[in-house]
Amino acid sequence: MAVHYLEIVSDDVDKLVGLYQHVHGLSFGPPDPDVGQARVATQSDGTVVGIRKPLAAHEQPIMRTYLEVEDIHEATKKAEESGARIAYPPTGQGDHGTFAIVIHGDVEHGLWKR
């Protein structure tokens, strides 16, 4: 199991970008429309960190981890069979790959296929 994308949703993107640059030495690019206008930094191991504002009024600040999967459709199906609710079905993100979000145990679980 490997982390592909760490998504941080906050009303204060600039403050968190500054924190992650200062504490972790990350270098963020400009807002990327393919990932909800997130400011994105890629670590040397390929792990991606994105910081963005909420995309809807009901979206709360959160730190969501997306784990890599070989088959996003199969992983989403297995999660649903295990009792998870599908919050976002497999959805393409431009050249970044495909993500899905499932909710189980009151926790949002992100899945990502490059």
Image: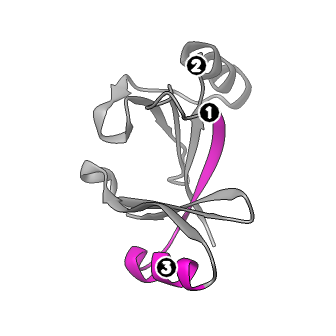
Tell me where the magenta segment starts and ends, as one range: 61-81
Distance from the alpha carbon under mark 3 to that under mark 1: 25 Å
Q: Residue at x 41, y 26 (%)?
A: 29
The quarter of the picture where the N terminus appears is: bottom right
- State which mark lies toward you, 3 or 1: 1
The residue sitting at 37% across, 63% down in the picture is 114
Within 10 Å of disc 2 (Cα), the crowding (few <14, some 14-19, many 20+) is few
28 left or right of 83 in image? left
In the image, 28 versus 65, the foreground residue is: 65
x and y, in percent, of residue 80 in the image? 54, 78
Check residue 60 in the rendering and tell me which mark sits there, or answer none. 1
The answer to which image quadrant residue 9 occupies is top right
Give the residue at mark 3. 75
Which of the two labelled residues, at mark 2 and mark 3, occupies the earlier sequence position?
A: 2
Q: Nearer the viewer, residue 79 or 4?
A: 79
Q: Position of residue 47 (x, y in %)?
A: 54, 51
Gap in angstroms between the C-alphas marked 2 and 3: 31 Å
Residue 42 vertical position relative to residue 99 in the rendered view, above or below: above
- What residue appears at the point 55 percent right and 44 percent down from the top-left corner? 43
Mark 1, Cα crowd under 10 Å, few <14 / some 14-19 / many 20+, is few
Residue occupied by mark 2: 11
Q: Quadrant of residue 24?
A: top right
Amino acid type shown at disc 1: Gln
